[in-house]
Amino acid sequence: MSTSPHPSASSAPLLRISRVLIKLWLVLNGLTGLLVVVMLLASFFFEPTFQQFFSTRPPRIDPGLLIPTLRLAMLLALPMFAFIHVLLSRLLSIIETVRVGDPFVPENAVRLTSIAWCLLAVQLLHLVFGAMTALVNAAGSNVVWKHSGTGWVAVVLLFVLARVFQEGTRMRTDLQEVI
């Protein structure tokens, strides 16, 4: 049985598509983060307009609670964009090692661990946003927050895969030293 150092011809298009999608997500993540910064700044500039709008619209929403809560949510979203950027960048680096035919390198174990920590941070922020949804709803809004355990399973899975990569690369190095 022969093993090729490069990905099979059938997986090459999937790798190209993955790389393009991740690069696109990186751009969209950056643009969305920039948009949130602009919205945060605009919330101060247009505060009187927002105050009047939310005070007079039926059903009445308490702008004194809503506006600071939304600002805090936007502020907390900024590190989330940073975590997602790191996550996608590390994933792109892993895909590159697959593309060149050598994914079982120690750096990928570190990258997977980094991705797991970033996803954990995003999951924790998601819980914070759930609590903030309750505040926004207390102000008179009707925002729905949904929670799923899938992200938490992914966090555990990534930490385990990182450990598997660590052990696999260690075993590979030991084998190469023997040969």
Image: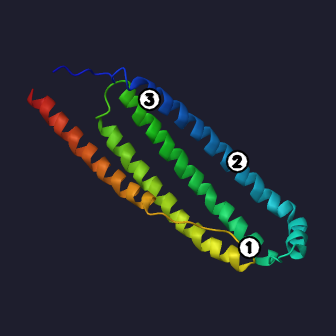
Q: Against 120, is 137 above or below?
A: below
Q: Are marks 3 and 1 in contact (CB under 8 Å)?
A: no
Please identify, in this view, whether the residue under mark 2 or under mark 3 is nearer the observer: 3
Q: Which residue is mark 1?
A: 141
**Residue type for callout 3:** Leu
x, y (%) of residue 15? Answer: 44, 29
Q: Is residue 133 left or right of residue 116?
A: right
Q: Which residue is mark 2?
A: 34
State which quadrant residue 10 falls in. Answer: top left
* Mark sitting earlier along the chain (3/1): 3
Q: Is residue 57 left or right of residue 132?
A: right
Q: Nearer the viewer, residue 81 or 62?
A: 62
Q: Secondary structure at mark 2?
A: helix
x, y (%) of residue 41? Answer: 78, 57
Q: Nearer the viewer, residue 45 or 91?
A: 91
Q: CA distance from mark 3 to mark 1?
A: 43 Å
Which quadrant: the N terminus?
top left
Please identify, in this view, whether the residue under mark 2 or under mark 1 is nearer the observer: 1
Say few, some or many: other residues with alpha carbon within 10 Å of mark 2 (under 14 / 14 to 19 / 20 or more): some
**Residue type for callout 1:** Ser
Q: CA distance from mark 2 to mark 3?
A: 30 Å
x, y (%) of residue 135? Answer: 67, 76
Q: Which residue is mark 3?
A: 14
Q: Are marks 2 and 1 in contact (CB under 8 Å)?
A: no
Q: Residue at x 66, y 61 (%)?
A: 75
State which quadrant residue 104 falls in. Answer: top left
Q: Residue at x 77, y 56 (%)?
A: 39
Q: Secondary structure at mark 1?
A: loop
* Mark sitting earlier along the chain (2/3): 3
